[in-house]
Amino acid sequence: MKILVYIQQDEGKINSVSLEALKGAQDIAAQTNGTVSALSFNSGVCSQLTGYDVAEVLVAEDDKLNTFNPLFYLKALEDIANAESPDIIVFGHSYEARDWAPRLSARLDIPLISDCIGFKMEDKLTFIRSIYQGKLNSDSVVNKGAFIVSFQSGAFRVDGLQSGSAEIRRMTVDLSGVGDSITPEEKFQEAEQAVDLTQADVIVSVGRGIGKEENIEMARELSKTLGGEIAASRPVVDAGWLESSRQVGSSGQTVSPKLYLALGISGAIQHVVGMKGSKNIVVINKDANAPLFEIADYGVVGDIFEIVPKLISGIQGSQ
């Protein structure tokens, strides 16, 4: 089985969701005796990719690929797919991929299974999708032929990527016949107050158990002490205690930090789908039956207003 992973880059830096998708591809290859190749439209990131366990790194270079344009990207990957005949094309489920992966599916006339949270090997390779705001999971199987799959952020852990050594192979694509009906404008910039929680190594997240707005300062101090970011479940954001850019869950951001410390969060499924990919989950809640304890690596049943100040003091005392 040949697996081709498209690697998205932003200003010369590999998008983290692409690396997670690469890890997913490695896992699929391990269970299917397959091979993985990585594809980039930017030669600057290829040296980073050669350090991973891939058969080879493909790079398509053309001035028209320097800036994202779905028409040029579509034609370039169509040419490469026709030349390489991969069995699976893998994307990270980013906003960019949502734009042109469906177009590629239509152009190649192959199925697209989008926004997957994982896979499993049963009689056939089966992909898992979360539906109804995370309340249910559905299984998707392609019975025959090639297909495209995208994995959502947090589906796989980047720190599990297998290292290796790969060569770079340059590909030629013909974009001369592609029209320019789409003209990229200035890149969208987030508002200054917005925060990208997906880049945080440590997140301290507060839920309804924080009680009132002024108590958030305690959690903010803990996040600062740990060198992390503060986040929240939806009830806290709906109350106006934290800005919406700090919401984690199905209607907020999906994160996978090295440490996710949940304070007073019961664990509604809408929140869980946004943080279950975290590498270490620590839950502090006075309700021993809080659902979030089910996925916690470490759990503390107790009052956050007694535990957190002692935790802050202990950490600061050891620094």
Image: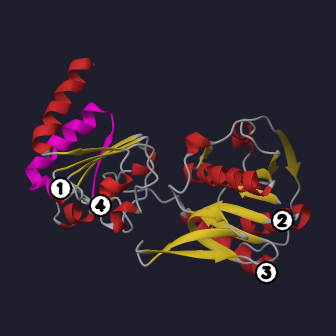
What is the tally of numbered marks visible in this picture?
A: 4
Q: In this view, does 151 lie to the left or right of 1?
A: left
Q: Which amino acid does label 3 sit on?
A: Asp
In this rendering, which labeled residue sits more in front, label 1 or label 2? 1
Assess whether residue 282 is covered by the magenta stretch.
Answer: no
Quadrant holding the C terminus: top left
Pinpoint residue 229: horizontal percent, then vertical percent.
32, 43
- At label 2, counting other C-alpha atoms closer than 10 Å, the crowd grade (few under 14, some 14-19, many 20 or more) is some
Proximity of marks 1 and 4: CB atoms separated by less than 8 Å: no
Q: In which quarter of the image is residue 298?
A: top left
Proximity of marks 3 and 4: CB atoms separated by less than 8 Å: no
Q: Give the range drawn in magenta.
A: 209-232
Q: Residue at x 64, y 49 (%)?
A: 23
Q: Which amino acid does label 1 sit on?
A: Asp
Instruction: Give the labeled residue for mark 3.
Output: 109
Q: Which residue is drawn at 59% across and 42% down?
A: 160
The dot on residue 81 is 2
Q: Which amino acid does label 4 sit on?
A: Pro
Q: Is residue 184 visible?
A: no
In this rendering, which labeled residue sits more in front, label 3 or label 4? 4
Rounded to the nearest angstrom, the CA distance separating label 1 from label 2 is 53 Å
In the picture as drawn, the residue positioned furthest to the top comes out as: 318
Pinpoint residue 10: horizontal percent, then vertical percent.
59, 50
Quadrant holding the N terminus: bottom right
Say if 164 sits above or below 146 in the image: above
Which of pointers 1 and 2 lies earlier in the amino acid sequence?
2
Instruction: Give the labeled residue for mark 4.
Output: 291
Proximity of marks 2 and 3: CB atoms separated by less than 8 Å: no
Assess whether residue 231 is covered by the magenta stretch.
Answer: yes
Rounded to the nearest angstrom, the CA distance separating label 3 from label 4 is 43 Å
Which of pointers 3 and 4 lies earlier in the amino acid sequence?
3
Q: Which amino acid does label 2 sit on?
A: Ala
